[in-house]
Image (cartoon, grey):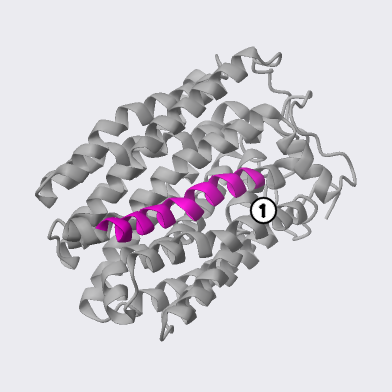
Amino acid sequence: MDRNGSPDRPGIVDSRAPGHRGLVLGMLCFVYVLNFLDRQLVSILAKPIQDGLQITDSQLGRITGFYFALFYCFIAIPVGWLADRTNRVKVLSLACGLWSAATAACGMAANYGQLVVARMAVGVGEAGGVPPSYAIISDSFPREQRGTAMGIFNLGPPLGSALGVAFGASLAAAYDWRVPFYVVGAVGVLTAVLVYLIVPEPARGQFDPAPVSAVAAEPGQGFGQAIRSFFGNRILAVTALASGAANFITYGLSNFATLFLMREKGMTLEEVAIWYALAVGIGMGAGIFVSGRLIDRFGVRNKAAYASIPALSLLLALPFFLGFATAERWEVALALLCVPLFLNSFFLPATVTFVQGEVDPDARVISGALLLLVMNLIGLGLGPTFVGMASDFFRPEYGGHALQMAFYALAPMYLIAALLFLWLARLIRRAPSAAVPERREANPV
């Protein structure tokens, strides 16, 4: 491997070729689908798992939130630092195999403690999944196409959630809640092998402008220095904080939505497998793809669009979220939920694309990992934990409507996240490098 991380495997085709870039993007998106499917299976199968292992809403919130995020977030930092200095594809392949094996282990859990340990192992593996993929995509696509590419890649969460609901709920209804974990784990191990064989390691910075801006990775830059460079930049720090607030909503809602629809709105597991799966797949998928296209269109002209578009989307989503929590029938609730599903994730392609474009190519994986650290520590770690604890808090007084009250308590985060993104937009406008630089010619591979 050369200093730019070029692959040491023979027979790799030019990673700049449009057709091959599409193949790489499709493969990485499928890995992200599995990543998110594995992550969401416990939430999707919350009701049968609760019945089988006798766990409370607070325990469910911790196992899908804090316990998972504790390992997922912090291990991503050293993994990202290592991937910036080694072969990112190999790191991704190894991580995919690890989290898939741990997912299968979740199906073997006989009690809550064993399920906690297995979920922590899933978090360890998934820590090496997304940040290397961000960097591979950024070094495979020119700047003016990255928003769309990141939007397509970030279809992983909605597709993973939809497939998890459809196949996970169907398999659980037909057999047992443990079977989906075995099946998904086996598919993931096979995919890990295919990633190593198919995906090339692109040359670092081949599509980037000559001047780099926020975070530069000097040769031999230390681990601590890389962290200080990221958080020492005010714009990147606020980007991470705003993304965390938005992710607090996303995970707080998604990790309890199926339980809410089944327990308080009367949906059956079979109905969840069809209608909720369609809502997640179409709503979230369309939202992430549309947001990527909007970023490519407006972000080229004005960098502040990377923040103002997510702020507007969150404000528009709030009344529909409240309608979802208030509706009496599951059909009405699910119809209203489609709008927040569409709008809630607008921030994801915007912030990821923005950060990847602001840092040096040799700091992309660690910068993506640091963004995910804050985003997921706040969102994944605290969002579901907050909703689960709020539900148990309201249960003595509100009984069967405790989750509804917990969702009401979640609603103010929409305003907090929107204000943070508006603050970010103001910082970007005032930054001296607000203009998007011209792209340089790609370096020969």
Residue at the limit of the structure toward the front, as seen here: 397
Q: Residue 44: give x, y in percent of width and height.
A: 32, 63
For the question of whether residue 204 can be seen, the reply is no
Residue at the limit of the structure toward the left, as seen here: 329
Q: Residue 392: give x, y in percent of width and height.
A: 31, 61
> Most prominent secondary structure in the magenta stretch?
helix
Q: Quadrant of residue 171?
A: bottom left
Magenta segment includes 276: no
Which element type, helix, strand or loop, lies under badge 1? Answer: loop
Q: Disc 1 marks which residue?
A: 200
Q: Residues within 10 Å of mark 1 (few under 14, many from 20)?
A: many
Q: What residue type is labelled 1?
A: Pro
Residue drawn at (50%, 20%) of the image: 305
Q: Residue 147: give x, y in percent of width and height.
A: 52, 32
Q: In this view, does 17 lie to the left or right of 109?
A: right
Residue drawn at (60%, 66%) of the image: 124
Q: Quadrant of the N terminus?
A: bottom right
Q: Is residue 264 left or right of residue 51?
A: left
In the image, is residue 179 above or below residue 225? below
For the question of whether residue 202 can be seen, the reply is yes
Q: Residue 183: give x, y in percent of width and height.
A: 39, 76
Q: Quadrant of residue 135?
A: top right
Q: Is residue 280 left or right of residue 125?
A: left
Toward the viewer: 433 or 51? Answer: 51
In the image, is residue 240 above or below residue 89? above
Magenta segment includes 383: yes
Please state the extent of the stretch shown in magenta in the rendering.
370-394
Residue drawn at (17%, 43%) of the image: 326
